[in-house]
Image (cartoon, helix red, strand yellow):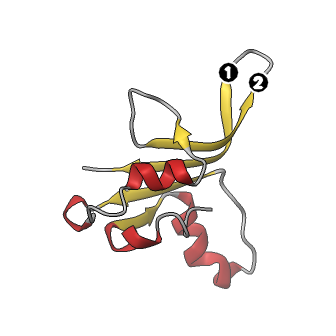
Amino acid sequence: MIEDPLAAQRDSLTLIGGQAVMMRTVDRYGFNTFTKDADFAITPELVSDAPNIEQVLKDAGFESRNRDRPGLWGRNPITTPDGRTVYTEQLDLNCP
């Protein structure tokens, strides 16, 4: 999902959450389930100035999912019958 857009920032990102567990256990259990989001922890000291993470995500079609929480991104929005916007792809960037 996001490997290509954030490849230049790879050293500053650590996969956490459900995706990390699944990637570590798929060989052991022989199957892989899925989650609809990816969670990354950001190490601020390792983030490079270029490319700018926000711009890279926008260029890849992601948009902010919540203006009050700048680390929440989504792509492929869908409007639910009750008027909410949900995303088929979600990315959570967590920074200390």
x and y, in percent, of residue 35 in the image: 65, 54
Q: Which residue is mark 1?
A: 84
Residue 7, position as x, y percentages in the image: 46, 72
Q: Nearer the viewer, residue 73 or 35?
A: 73
Residue 37 or 67: which is nearer the viewer? 67
* Image coordinates for residue 76, horizontal then vertical, percent: 70, 43
**Residue 64 position in % (x across, y down):** 50, 36
Q: Is residue 91 left or right of residue 75?
A: left
| Residue type pointed to by label 1 | Arg
Q: Residue furthest bottom?
A: 27
Q: Local crowd at mark 1 within 10 Å, few (<14), some, or many (≥20)?
A: few
Q: Quadrant of the N terminus?
A: bottom right
Q: As rendered, which of 3 and 92 lies closer to the eye?
A: 3
State which quadrant residue 50 falls in.
bottom left
Q: Is residue 81 above or below residue 64?
A: above
Give the structural element (helix, strand or loop) at label 1.
Answer: loop
Mark 2 residue crowding within 10 angstroms, few (<14) / some (14–19) / many (20+): few
Q: Which residue is mark 2?
A: 80
Q: In the rendered image, which quarter is residue 9 located in?
A: bottom left
Residue drawn at (40%, 43%) of the image: 71
Are the residues flagged by discs 1 and 2 in contact, CB closer than 8 Å?
A: yes
Residue 86's place in the image compared with 52, above or below, is: above
Tell me if 86 is positioned left or right of 11 in this view.
right
- For residue 28, the mark is none
Q: Residue at x 76, y 24 (%)?
A: 80
Q: CA distance from mark 1 to mark 2?
A: 5 Å
Residue 70, picture quadrant: top left
Q: In terms of depth relative to the viewer, which is nearer, 51 or 3? A: 51
- Please name the residue shown 75% across and 15% down the image: 82
Instruction: Identify which amino acid the numbered label 2 is placed on.
Output: Thr
In the rendered image, the residue lying farthest to the right is 81
